[in-house]
Image (cartoon, rainbow, N blue to C red):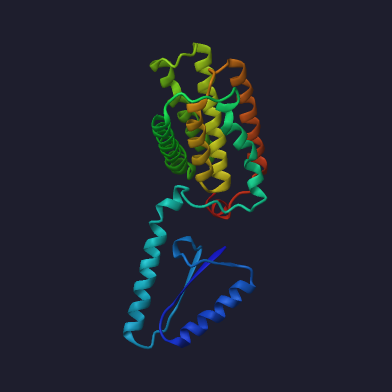
Amino acid sequence: MKIGFVSLGCPKNQLDTEVMLHEVLQAGYEITPEETEADIVIINTCAFIESAKQEAIDNILDIAWLKKHNKLEWFGLCKPTASAKAFLFYIPLIVLTSKNLWGGAAMHYDAPGTVCFIVKMLCVGFLEELIFRGFLFKAMSRDSIKWAVIVSSVTFGLGHIINLINGSGMGLAENLVQIFFAVLIGFLYVIIFWRGGSLWPCVISHGAFNSLSAFSVDGEAIGRLVILCVLTVAYALILLKTLPRSEANKALY
């Protein structure tokens, strides 16, 4: 649990705050200077004079507003809180993210074109994660985690049906398997977000996955896609059982 301190008033209050800081640290709690990151904010003040009381009230109201409107953290745009050991669970994610390079790599655009493509793909990855995991999953998860996972995964996958319309160069079977693979990737990302509490691993993986397609040298062989589907669902189920949940998510769900 993270605890924030705000010390108001005279030097005596500052000394009292330092004593409390020592006691809190000795008890094993984490101190944070950012009120919006704190689970609890302690405001140490006095109430001998009217101006001091009003200053305390104003600070309480300000901090309450900051906590209430901390939308970035609510949508998962916060740093991961997992331990170093927990990050080992993301090693297979790095392997899956590099899928577009498994058959080799080549430049398909000039340098400015490649940079523009990568920037565009990073933006797409960020926006899609924010929409399907940050908005949709979070909005539905209050009522039902199960349906939030299903709906956010399936809608993300079905969004790739556009490949059937715009002429991706693949056959019908390859396109259908790719859509199914997108559903499973959506399932994997939502599990990572739900268990880990941060959207950033999903954003980074998604953006890198898309960006590396600029260097892919072969098409989507159906056999490889089927193998990827099996590996992705197995990895997601393993994370569902083993990835430690963040303290924030334990409190929410």
Q: Is residue 180 left or right of residue 72?
A: right
Q: Is residue 117 left or right of residue 40?
A: left
Check the image and report above or below for 139 versus 74. above
Check the image and report above or below for 12 versus 251. below
Please state the total of marks drawn on the protein image: 0
Q: Position of residue 99 (x, y in %)?
A: 58, 28
Is residue 147 among the parts visible in the rendering? Answer: no
Check the image and report above or below for 233 versus 54. above
Residue sitting at x 58%, y 31%: 98
Q: Position of residue 144 (x, y in %)?
A: 51, 40
Q: Position of residue 10 (x, y in %)?
A: 42, 86
Q: Residue 64: which quarter of the image?
A: bottom left
Q: Position of residue 246 (x, y in %)?
A: 58, 52
Is 163 or 61 nearer to us in this picture?
163
Residue sitting at x 57%, y 41%: 192
Residue sitting at x 48%, y 42%: 143
Residue sitting at x 67%, y 37%: 238
Is 24 or 174 nearer to us in this picture?
174
Check the image and report above or below for 148 versus 62. above
Is 212 or 139 nearer to us in this picture?
212
Q: Residue furthest front?
A: 110
Is residue 120 among the parts visible in the rendering? Answer: yes
